[in-house]
């Protein structure tokens, strides 16, 4: 941003900023708006890998796998980006990991977690890393295009204990009060995006703030119906003002029995803390941290958590027959039948539900039409494995692996044909430096193959 562009920001923005930031810090904040936005990444805990220079990468204090990059690289041609060895995510957003860890001892062994406004998926992937395969995450996004991006990112991150839903928040109550924890990163006026987006700066008005505050309050009120008494809420957004943070939480608390919670942090992190009516708000200002703008508040829904909910586990999903099981077992890790259940939907897509959460997953599939990510699909009698199966590392270890160099991987990601020098035939995994990239099916002659890399992930503009 250029210096003169500061004057184009609506003057009432500065009035609202003065409500939450000490006057002596505002000049530094204004100056920080002129600086480049900070880029950060988070490594996948199971397949994390990168090629960034050690001089370009610095660890985050609140996430063990989070790093700030001094200079933003080109991510598009990087095979490790496409294999989900890392996720590009603002450092302020990664603070969610620290909050989740602070709640760990208060949650049951297999918690049901809801990411209520989940796209594009960064927070869902943090939650999945935190759960480490236990419990169940419902990743919800109502906007179809945003949900498509969310599903792509969840597919690449590769966890089984996951359902995706597309419900308006007032319909989440159809499942009953079953969630142990909700993360609600509500739509906001986008003040934390000012360094990244000229459109965000130009769009900001007091009316936009008021509109979003009303919408945020509705989302929170609706979502509480699906939260267990004794359940937790992590409310956050990428804006700074009082109205969309303190104003929303205080209004929510007036008609709901909420207990404010405090998260221990280090003073050295330079996060701005404020309190209102007992609630603590954690603000990430540009001039204080290496990252973009976020605000968090954590609270608990009071009440008796002993009341049980009748789970509706009858669904239209059916179990595969013996012939179908024999077909897909060629592609899938052998021990999966011991720890969960396979199901087919009416489209012939194959799903897997871990045994520890099967009943709850079926209840959510029935009550709010949540869906697991498919491991593949049957086309007549033949099984075609999905990209999700591969990204989750669930492929049968007997399937051949074809090791590609960087140029070949680049062509594969762009879905440009090339020939392989291999004697293998049939289904195989295309890999780059130990990272699975895509399913391929090698033809009997001439080194030709069919590339099953998803079209939605195809590398286009590079």
Image (cartoon, grey):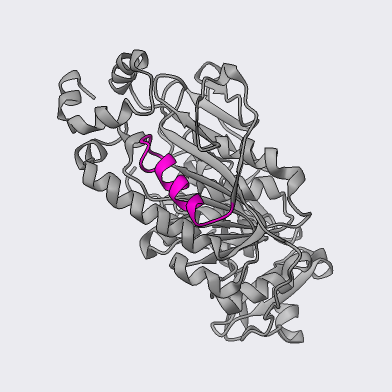
Q: Residue at x 74, y 79 (%)?
A: 325
* Count of marks overlaid on the render: 0
Q: Quadrant of the C terminus?
A: top left
Q: Is residue 88 left or right of residue 216?
A: right
Query: Is 106 included in the stretch rendered in magenta?
Result: no
Q: Which residues are magenta?
A: 238-257
* Image quarter of residue 357: bottom right
Residue 341: percent from the left, percent from the top? 75, 73
Q: Is residue 333 left or right of residue 270?
A: right
Asked if residue 76 shows in the view, the reply is: no
In the rendering, at what x and y percent does residue 354 appear? 74, 66
The reply to whether residue 13 is visible in this rendering is: yes
Residue nearer the viewer, 64 or 360: 360
Q: Residue at x 71, y 61 (%)?
A: 304
Q: Nearer the viewer, residue 241 or 80?
A: 241
Instruction: Say which of 404 and 191 sits in front.
Output: 191
Residue at the location (44% across, 55% down)? 457
The residue at the point 55 percent across, 28 percent down is 67
């Amino acid at each position: 941003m250029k210096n003169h562009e500061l004057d184009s920001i609506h003057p009432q923005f500065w009035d609202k900023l003065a409500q939450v930031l000490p006057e002596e810090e505002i000049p530094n904040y204004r100056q920080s708006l002129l600086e480049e936005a900070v880029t950060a990444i988070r490594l996948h805990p199971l397949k994390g890998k990168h090629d960034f220079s050690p001089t370009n990468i610095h660890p985050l204090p609140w996430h063990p796998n989070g790093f700030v990059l001094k200079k933003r690289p080109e991510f598009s041609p990087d095979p490790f980006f496409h294999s989900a060895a890392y996720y590009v995510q603002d450092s302020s957003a990664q603070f969610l990991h620290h909050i989740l860890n602070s709640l760990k001892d208060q949650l049951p062994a297999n918690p049901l977690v809801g990411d209520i406004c989940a796209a594009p998926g960064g927070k869902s992937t943090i939650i999945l890393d935190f759960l480490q395969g236990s419990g169940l995450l419902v990743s919800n996004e109502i906007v179809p295009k945003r949900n498509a991006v969310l599903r792509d990112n969840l597919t690449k991150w590769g966890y089984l204990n996951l359902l995706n839903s597309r419900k308006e928040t007032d319909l989440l109550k159809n499942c009953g009060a079953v969630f142990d924890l909700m993360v609600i990163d509500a739509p906001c006026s986008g003040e934390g995006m000012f360094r990244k987006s000229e459109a965000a700066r130009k769009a900001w008005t007091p009316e936009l703030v008021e509109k979003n505050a009303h919408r945020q309050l509705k989302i929170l009120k609706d979502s509480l119906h699906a939260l267990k008494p004794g359940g937790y809420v992590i409310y956050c957004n990428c804006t700074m003002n009082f109205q969309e943070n303190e104003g929303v939480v205080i209004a929510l608390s007036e008609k709901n029995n909420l207990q404010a919670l405090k998260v221990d942090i280090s003073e050295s992190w330079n996060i701005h803390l404020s309190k209102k009516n007992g609630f603590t708000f954690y603000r990430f200002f540009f001039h204080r941290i290496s990252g973009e703008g976020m605000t968090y508040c954590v609270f608990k829904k009071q009440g008796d958590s002993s009341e049980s909910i009748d789970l509706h586990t009858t669904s239209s999903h059916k179990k595969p027959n013996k012939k179908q099981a024999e077909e897909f077992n060629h592609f899938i890790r052998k021990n999966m039948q011991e720890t969960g259940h396979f199901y087919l939907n009416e489209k012939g897509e194959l799903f897997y539900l871990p045994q520890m959460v099967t009943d709850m997953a079926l209840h959510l599939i029935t009550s709010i039409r949540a869906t697991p990510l498919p491991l593949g699909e049957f086309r007549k009698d033949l099984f075609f494995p999905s990209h999700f199966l591969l990204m989750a590392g669930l492929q049968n270890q007997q399937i051949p692996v074809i090791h590609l160099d960087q140029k070949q991987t680049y062509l594969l990601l762009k879905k440009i044909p090339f020939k392989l020098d291999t004697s293998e035939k049939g289904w195989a995994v295309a890999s780059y430096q130990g990272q699975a990239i895509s399913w391929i099916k090698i033809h009997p002659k001439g080194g030709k193959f069919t590339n099953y890399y998803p079209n939605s992930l195809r590398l286009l503009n590079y």
